[in-house]
Amino acid sequence: MNIRTVKMGFLYLCCLCVFWEASCVFAAIAPNPIIQADLKTLFTNPPEVNGYPYQDLLTTAADRYGLSLAYVLAVVRGESFFDPKAKSHKGALGLMQVMPSTASEYGMTSQDLLDPSKNIDVGVHYLSDLYTQFKDPYLALAAYYCGPGGVDGENFTLREDCNEYVHYIHAHLKKILSGAGKKAAGETVTKQHFVLTRFDNFLDAEQFLAFLSNKLPNIELDIFRDEVVHSDHVRYQYKIMAAYEKTDGKDKICSSVEKATGFSFCN
């Protein structure tokens, strides 16, 4: 075997590695048609939504930038659970978890992102720009999390992690829509939550939430993701939470969950 053959073989292997790596980085996944239809309906037939924190600011921004209020609320709920002081390991800040680098493109600083009105304005503005770019609410949501590079607008596909984010936000959208129009205007929802259990996989968490919600329809259950920081990487963990108001509410919920599932999640 001569040196030319060896070089050509090495070049061929390199090309295969590059192709394999690229295919792994961008696994082409098509949008879920049911979720896509739900998201599009928000724009063609906007639901009435009341009773959420910062709703006046969110309504103003949604109207200003041409987005559905429920669409924006789902993002805020999923990103920070309406915590204006939320900060991610990567540095995303505030209600809409906006990165400082993104904020700077809209003339705002990191400090500005801790102001709810400014955070909402830049977050909704950015989401609106993505919606204009991709002309689809599903892909816009994916790009809000992954950046435009995680979405292929021409072929209408997206990366797996971007797709999981859309499913996660859709879970929050369903919670918002389930209470749409039922709360009095100007009333703010204030309830305490505690964690029942956690899942490393969103699909498992979503299925368990659906199972438990069906078993215990009178208990307000929710899903939220937390960052789990390791020495060499950061991953998400999905926690199933229950809402309660009275001091003895937590014990009653724990007892109900144990009776419904046969397992104790509160010890």
Image: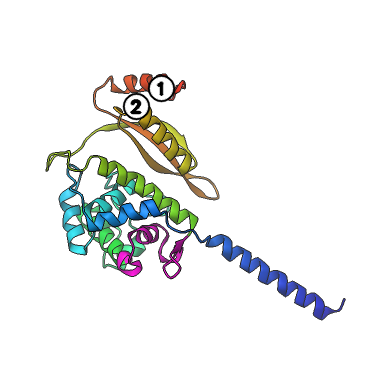
Q: Main secondary structure of the magenta part?
A: helix
The tag earlier along the polypeptide, 1 or 2, is: 2
Q: Which residue: 33% across, 57% down?
A: 98
Q: Contact (CB < 8 A) between labels 1 and 2?
A: yes
Coordinates of residue 35 in the picture (x, y in percent): 37, 51
User: With 105 as the anchor, is 5 left or right in this view?
Assistant: right
Mark 2: which amino acid?
Leu
Task: Depth check: give the residue in front, 159 or 246.
Answer: 159
Q: Residue at x 45, y 35 (%)?
A: 198
- Residue extent of the magenta highlight: 130-158
In what element is the residue under mark 2? Answer: loop
Q: Which residue is mark 1?
A: 260
Residue 122 location (% of width, % of height): 26, 61
Image disc number at residue 216:
2
Q: Quadrant of residue 258?
A: top left
| C-alpha span from label 1 to label 2 | 8 Å
Frontmost residue, 91 versus 73 = 73
- Does the rendering let one see residue 165? yes
Label 1 crowding class (10 Å Cα cut-off): few <14, some 14-19, many 20+? some
Residue positioned 21% across, 43% down in the render: 180
Q: Label 1's element?
A: helix
Badge 2 crowding class, 10 Å Cα cut-off, few under 14, some 14 to 19, many 20 or more, is some
Residue 214, image x and y in percent?
36, 30
Give the quadrant of the N terminus: bottom right
- 87 relative to 16 in the view: left or right: left
Q: In the image, which disc is placed on residue 234?
A: none
Three-letter amino acid code of the residue under disc 1: Ala
**265 inside magenta stretch:** no
